[in-house]
Amino acid sequence: MAKYSTGRSGGGDDGDSCELCGKQSGKLRQANVAGANLLVCPDCAPHSENRKTDRKRSQQDQQRDNTQVSRKKRAAQTAAKMYDAQKGDAKHWEKEGTNYEKDRLPYLVTDYGPKVEAARQEEGLTVEDLAADIDEDEDDVLAVEQGRATRAGVGGSVIRKLESRLDLSLVDE
């Protein structure tokens, strides 16, 4: 059964339980429900008389999360470009140019390499067979499996072919 707060601490060891429904949660927040100030879980927060404030706070949290993801993506792209610039052989870029816009590598899910390797093995294919099936370089497929697609300069088209052939989702959108 839920407990109701009188605004004073004392008794009970339910510091991480919702005071409205009793559910354990690490994301409790203050809410005014029927005149009582309670610590409630996100599920009970809509019952607060401060719904507009809570909704605004939730939208601000969402925007902050999106900004952090965008920053991480830009940082990863910048790091990849810097790594490529420091890598050494500039003649490669003079001949072929950069492919950051033509065949841009998308933002990949966490642990994409092991996922590709497991799917390939489940299909009973070798790296050579898979590379031949998707008509791509064996080194590129191996780089993806080893989780170093960015450093190896693997293009987004290779990722899309692997997703299609192995029925995987590798792009983090």
Image (spheres, grey):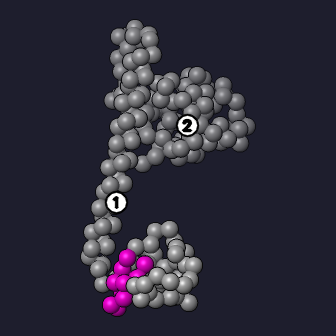
Look at the image and tell me whether residue 47 can be seen: no
Does the magenta segment cover residue 22?
no
Q: In x, y percent, where is residue 139?
A: 58, 22
Which residue is depicted at the point 50% across and 24% down? 152
Q: Residue at x 60, y 31 (%)?
A: 146
Give amino acid for label 1.
Gln
Q: Which mark is residue 162?
A: 2
- Kindly state the secondary structure of the residue where label 1 is placed: helix
Quarter of the view holding residue 129: top right
Q: Quadrant of residue 8?
A: bottom left
Residue 72 vertical placement versus 155 (above, below): below
Q: Is residue 35 magenta?
A: yes
Numbered range of the magenta stretch:
30-39
Amino acid at dot 2: Leu
Name above or below for residue 111 compared with residue 151: below
Residue 37 relative to residue 132: left or right: left
In this view, 15 is above or below 156: below
Estimate how packed mark 2 is, as few (under 14), some (14 to 19) or many (20 or more) residues with alpha carbons within 10 Å: many
For the stretch drawn in magenta, what is the main secondary structure?
strand
Mark 1, other Cα within 10 Å: few <14 / some 14–19 / many ≥20: few
Q: Which mark is residue 62?
A: 1
Residue in the foreground of this view, choosing between 150 and 167: 150
How much space separates mark 2 and mark 1, taking CA atoms?
A: 32 Å
Give left or right: position of 96 versus 160.
left
Residue drawn at 71 percent across, 42 percent down: 122
